[in-house]
Image (cartoon, rainbow, N blue to C red):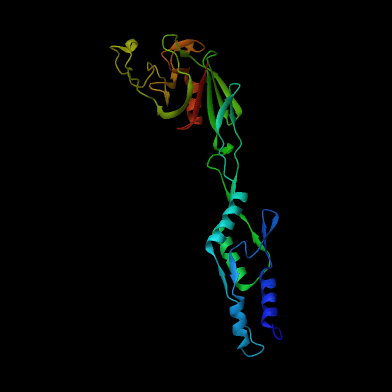
Amino acid sequence: MGGLSPAQAARVLRSQFARPLTIRLARRTLLATPRQLGALAHGAEAIRRARHTRPGRNVPLRVTVRSASLDRYLNRLAERFDRSTIDSSLLLRNGKPFVTKHRVGRALDRARLGRALLRSLKTHDRKPLSVTLRRIEPGVSRSSFREIIVIRRSANRLSLFDGMKLRRTFGIATGQAQYPTPLGNFNIIVKWSNPWWYPPQSDWAKDAKPIPPGPGNPLGTRWMGISSPAVGIHGTPDAASIGYSASHGCIRMLIPEVEWLFDQVDIGTPVFIVP
């Protein structure tokens, strides 16, 4: 600024300070002017000090930034570049499991970028700022869905899927007309090996006594209760009932097959029962 009049120095200061800041974000190059960011250079103050300072010495140019303006700019950037996550969801298509695609989210680190912008403004540094967006993984993705059971009541068939891929299908027995197996979306909520059978509160089980584990147990050797009251997937000593509507609402399986299925599924496994 040496040799310049105060008016000339003020014009140079305004021109130099007004240079935009360069932000590289999501493969785009953005320009932000100090005015957009709420920055004000106190040029008149610096010029007054320079007039009373020994020639050749540096006089700092003080810069203040209105936080409200900077916050508005950062919020606009976030609105433009942030992306919310989308969780996968499980549904049936044509009687088969279908898991929707998830979406990874992203978020601008507003605090970090804000600090970098302040530093550039106050030090008059106009080197480009490279900004990365924080990756946000969804809570539920396609890989979150493993074992899924689909029961087709009218066909007396139970199919086990690994996600959307069929693993194995079994013949089963479902409920009689007067005790139909419920339709809907359920989950396995309990697993018992060698269960006791306890008579339900139903007319058909009136006066019945509990039956301990063993060959005569109507539940066989495994019980997987679902989130429908008193309904579950279990073994049966009555192999001849498989393929028919013969139970009191539960899903019967051959004992070796229910033992295999028991080892494949966990608490929380989805169970779809369709007509």
Q: Name the residue at the left extreme.
A: 207
* Residue for point 59% across, 50% down: 79
**Can I make out residue 209 in this image?**
yes
In the rendered structure, the answer to whether residue 117 lies left or right of residue 184 reads right
The furthest residue to the bottom: 54
Looking at this view, name the residue that lies furthest to the front: 7
From the viewer's side, name the closer residue of 180 and 245.
180
The residue at the point 62 percent across, 64 percent down is 35
Residue 114 horizontal side relative to residue 263, left or right: right
Q: Is residue 229 above or below residue 269?
A: above
> Where is residue 221, by image quadrant?
top left
Q: Quadrant of the N terminus?
A: bottom right
The residue shown at (58%, 24%) is 168
Q: Is 244 located above or below residue 71 in the figure?
A: above
Q: Position of residue 69 (x, y in %)?
A: 56, 60
Which residue is more in the foreground, 160 or 184? 184
Q: Position of residue 187 (x, y in %)?
A: 46, 28
**Where's residue 94, x and y in %?**
61, 21
Q: Between residues 149 and 81, which one lies in front from this camera angle?
A: 81
Residue 109 visible in the shown view = no
- In the displayed structure, 25 sits above or below 95; it is below
Residue 231 in the image: state x and y as whole percent.
Answer: 41, 21
Image quarter for residue 147? Answer: top right
Task: Name the one closer to the observer, 235 or 149.
Answer: 149
Name the residue at 33% across, 20% down: 198
Name the quadrant containing residue 104: top right
Does residue 204 appear left or right of residue 156 in this picture?
A: left
